[in-house]
Image (cartoon, grey):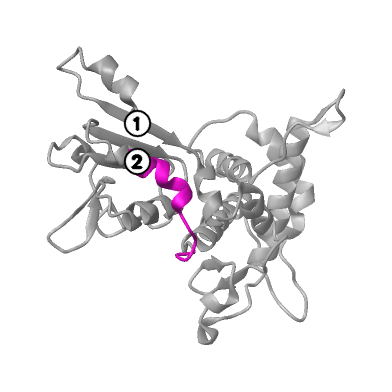
Amino acid sequence: MKLFNRLIQRKATNKSLPPNVVFLLGSGISYGAEMPSVESVTNHILHRGKSIVYNPDHYYYCFEDMVRKDRYIPDFGYVRRIVEFHNLLEREINAYYTYDKNLKILIRKANYEDIYFLASQIHDARIQEYGNPAIPALIEKITPDIQQALSGIQDQDRQETSWSIEHLAEEAMKYIRQILWCLLFSPNHTVDLSYLDFYAQAVADEDLDSIDFFTLNNDTVFEQFLGQRNIEFFDGFSQGSDSKFWWDTMSFFQPTNPRVRLLKLHGSVNWYTDQHVGKGSK
């Protein structure tokens, strides 16, 4: 019996409804491709893995060889301050989830997404982007513990300028985004991706008119897999007259697109916003 044959049979009685299937894929699909787990990424973010390097172009890297030696300068406390702030936010989040009194274990530990979300709430509340009456109390509570991160170090060897808490939160978010890119941008192309062949079987089923993959992962492992299997897919980007690929939400509704569509709900490490054009590109 062909894959999804029952689904096809159910829809055969309704000519107006073409056979289609939708997959919702979690970030765990990339684990088999040796991409870092959420726990591993969190450890990097909290400076428990490879040393983080800051360069004068205002980028954070998790590998020193990514930074041109002629452009490297001391980070003037950027990494130290942010790691201190992240660890404090981690403690606050873990305290919120607290311990199961019966099992004597933590219900769940904070991960980098939790830390990013809390930093964004602090930043947005401080710049009055979004009103959140709970944030001022949190800021008042943590301020004594982050005084060094805010004021910096002033001694005979180095000088660090003072930061506002909104600037600290903004740098903390930027740090997470850039370290995440650093860890996920280059998948291992030698890894065997045959564990994903189930999805290629679905695409090969000619009785299916369309296959949509909704995925939560930021890396490009699944795109790499589709490319290896010579599966044509559409991800919302169309090539413009300038040869660049530009994002267009409405393009998903064009009937000329391939029958396989990839929708990355959390974005992708190879997407960016062109500041000059104001549109998404890759």
Q: What residue is shown with label 1?
A: 3
Residue at left offset 66%, top offset 35%: 136
- Which residue type does callout 2 highlight? Gln
Q: Compared to 18, does 279 lie above or below?
A: below
Query: What residue occupies the far front of the structure in this picture?
Result: 1
> Is disc 2 placed on a helix, strand or loop?
helix
Judge by depth and name the residue closer to the eye, 194 or 65.
Answer: 194
Earlier sequence position, callout 2 versus callout 1: 1
Q: Quarter holding the C terminus? A: bottom left
Determine crowd level at label 2: few under 14, some 14-19, many 20+ residues with C-alpha closer than 10 A: few
Tag 2 and tag 1, C-beta contact below 8 Å: yes
Asked whether 208 falls inside the magenta stretch, the response is no
> Is disc 1 placed on a helix, strand or loop?
loop
- Measured in 3D between alpha carbons, the distance from the residue under mark 2 to the one under mark 1, in whole angstroms, is 7 Å
Q: Compared to 177, does 64 lie above or below?
A: below
Mark yes or no: residue 273 visible.
no
Residue at left offset 27%, top offset 60%: 276
Q: What residue is shown with label 2?
A: 201
Relative side of 86 to 222, left or right:
right
Relative side of 225 to 151, left or right:
left
- Which region shows up in magenta? 188-201
Q: Which mark is residue 199?
A: none
**Residue 244 occupies quadrant:** bottom left
Asked whether 200 falls inside the magenta stretch, the response is yes
Residue 277 image position (x, y, % from top left): 24, 56
Q: Quarter holding the N terminus? A: top left
- Which residue type does callout 1 highlight? Leu
